[in-house]
Image: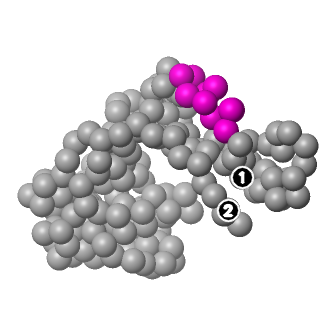
């Protein structure tokens, strides 16, 4: 949707050229809810209740921007002790939809665990935001469980703590 609205917005088509609302995870309905069945915090964002989406809909529609986002940031602060290598592995395998991590081979790669492009972006965001490690999507796909442990272990003393907020942001200067 973002791709469809940007060119129309740039050339100034009349009134409403289109609107893309980036909701983030929605907790009450859809694939995310069906897969998890619970409210999980992923990359500092918690699933947004559908009632919250409906509450901000008018606000989103009244914006003069063509791309807006609505998400709920986690209210839980992470301490260095809470964000360790085990938490990173558990977060990554949760993104992949893997349930049993107790007997996971450390040499198995994320590709072998079935990572797709959207999951790769989620893992990349998680690693960059919480562990200050920058990697390409291809490098993310080739990571092994053991390497993820190493990232969590080496960076566990400096994680980022998510803020508490419900927010609507307008994106400017989108390409």
Q: Looking at this rendering, what residue extends furthest in the left direction?
A: 81
What numbered label is drawn on residue 118? none
- Residue drawn where x is 35% and y is 40% of the image: 165
Q: Quadrant of the C terminus?
A: bottom right
In contact (CB < 8 Å): disc 2 and disc 1: yes
Q: In which quarter of the image is residue 174?
A: bottom right
Q: What segment carries the magenta color?
A: 54-63
Q: Which residue is drawn at 12% across and 60% down?
A: 80
In the visual, does 165 lie left or right of 118?
Answer: left
Q: Can residue 148 be seen in this view?
A: no
Whether residue 57 is in magenta: the answer is yes
Q: In this view, does 71 lie to the left or right of 44?
A: right
Query: x, y (%) of residue 89?
Result: 26, 60
Magenta segment: does it hold 70?
A: no
Residue 2, disc: 1
Its colouring scheme is one colour
From the viewer's perspective, is 124 left or right of 60?
Answer: left
Q: What element carries label 2?
A: loop
Question: To which residue does mark 2 refer?
Answer: 174
Looking at the picture, how far across and down is residue 115, in whole percent? 48, 61
Point out the tag, 2 or 1, that comes first from the N-terminus. Answer: 1
């Amino acid at each position: 949707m973002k791709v469809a609205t940007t060119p129309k917005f740039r050339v100034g088509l009349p009134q409403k050229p289109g609107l893309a609302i980036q909701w983030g995870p929605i907790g009450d309905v859809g694939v995310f809810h069906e897969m998890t069945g619970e409210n999980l915090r992923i990359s500092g964002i918690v699933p947004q209740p559908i009632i919250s989406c409906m509450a901000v809909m008018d606000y989103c529609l009244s914006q003069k921007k063509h791309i807006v986002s609505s998400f709920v940031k986690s209210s839980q602060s992470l301490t260095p002790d809470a964000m360790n290598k085990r938490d990173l592995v558990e977060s990554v395998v949760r993104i992949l939809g893997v349930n049993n991590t107790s007997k996971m081979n450390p040499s198995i790669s994320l590709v072998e665990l079935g990572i797709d492009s959207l999951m790769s972006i989620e893992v990349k965001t998680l690693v960059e935001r919480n562990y200050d490690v920058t990697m390409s999507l291809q490098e993310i796909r080739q990571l092994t469980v053991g390497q993820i442990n190493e990232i969590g272990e080496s960076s566990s003393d400096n994680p980022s703590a998510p803020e508490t907020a419900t927010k609507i942001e307008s994106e400017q200067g989108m390409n």
